[in-house]
Image (tube, rainbow, N blue to C red):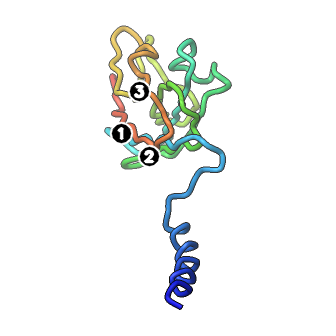
């Protein structure tokens, strides 16, 4: 009789345990969350991409395989890339304040804010893929990117 009750309790608890456990992504991959800091205003959009191709970084429009995202600029914006297969990636983003779809420049100097994974520094041009690269595995991860403005 005691054994029977434990078995019934075990069957009742099993579905609850499954509901309480983390869900497994049926499409595979992990979630890469990007926390964006230091926007100077909330006008326009944030345009970002996640790429594995060093040859096209940071201009992801040249990489048809890149994962791209556009969100409204707001206080503390967050980007969430889902179903990201394991690999080496870099993130580039810019604050498209006038929502015209491109990073505006004056004499080659950006008028709008930009940022890169690992807060990779710029010197005389955008950072290399290797200075911005991050390893994405099977665990979800969060990256913080500070938006920089020159003008």
**Which mark, residue 93?**
none
Percent from the top left, x then y, of residue 10?
A: 53, 77
Image coordinates of residue 103 in percent, x first then y, are: 50, 25
Residue picked out by circle 3: 116
CA distance for labels 3 and 1: 14 Å
Q: Nearer the viewer, residue 144 or 59?
A: 144
**Disc 2 marks which residue?**
78
Residue beneath the point at 48% across and 32% down: 136
Helix or strand or loop: what does disc 1 sit on? loop
Residue ID for mark 1: 39
Mark 3 or 1, which is nearer the eye?
Answer: 3
Check disc 3 and report its element: helix, strand or loop: strand
Q: Can you name the residue that lies furthest to the bottom here?
A: 1
Mark 3 and mark 2 lie on one chain; the one further toward the N terminus is 2
Q: Residue at x 36, y 37 (%)?
A: 144
Foreground residue among 119 and 74: 119
Q: Which mark's residue is nearer the viewer, 2 or 1? A: 2
Instruction: Give whichever of 71, 105 is nearer the camera.
Output: 71
User: Which one is earlier in the sequence, the residue at label 3 or at label 1?
Assistant: 1
Q: Which residue is rendered at x = 56% and y = 12% of the image? A: 55
Q: Residues within 10 Å of mark 2 (few under 14, many from 20)?
A: some
Left or right: 86, with 108 as reference point: right
Mark 1 or mark 2, which is nearer the start of the sequence? 1
Q: Image check: 24 left or right of 126?
A: right
């Amino acid at each position: 009789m005691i054994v029977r009750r434990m078995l019934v309790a075990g069957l009742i608890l099993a579905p609850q345990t499954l509901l309480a456990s983390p869900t497994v992504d049926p499409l595979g991959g992990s979630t890469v969350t990007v926390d964006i800091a230091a926007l100077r205003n909330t006008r326009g959009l944030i345009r970002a991409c996640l790429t594995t191709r060093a040859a096209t970084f940071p201009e992801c429009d040249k990489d048809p395989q890149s994962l791209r995202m556009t969100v409204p600029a707001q206080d503390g914006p967050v980007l969430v890339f889902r179903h990201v297969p394991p690999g080496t990636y870099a993130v580039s983003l810019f604050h498209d304040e006038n929502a015209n779809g491109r990073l505006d420049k004056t004499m080659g100097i950006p008028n709008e804010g930009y940022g890169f994974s690992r807060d990779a520094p710029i010197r005389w041009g955008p950072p290399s893929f290797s200075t911005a690269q991050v390893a994405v595995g099977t665990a979800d991860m969060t990256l913080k990117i500070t938006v920089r403005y020159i003008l």
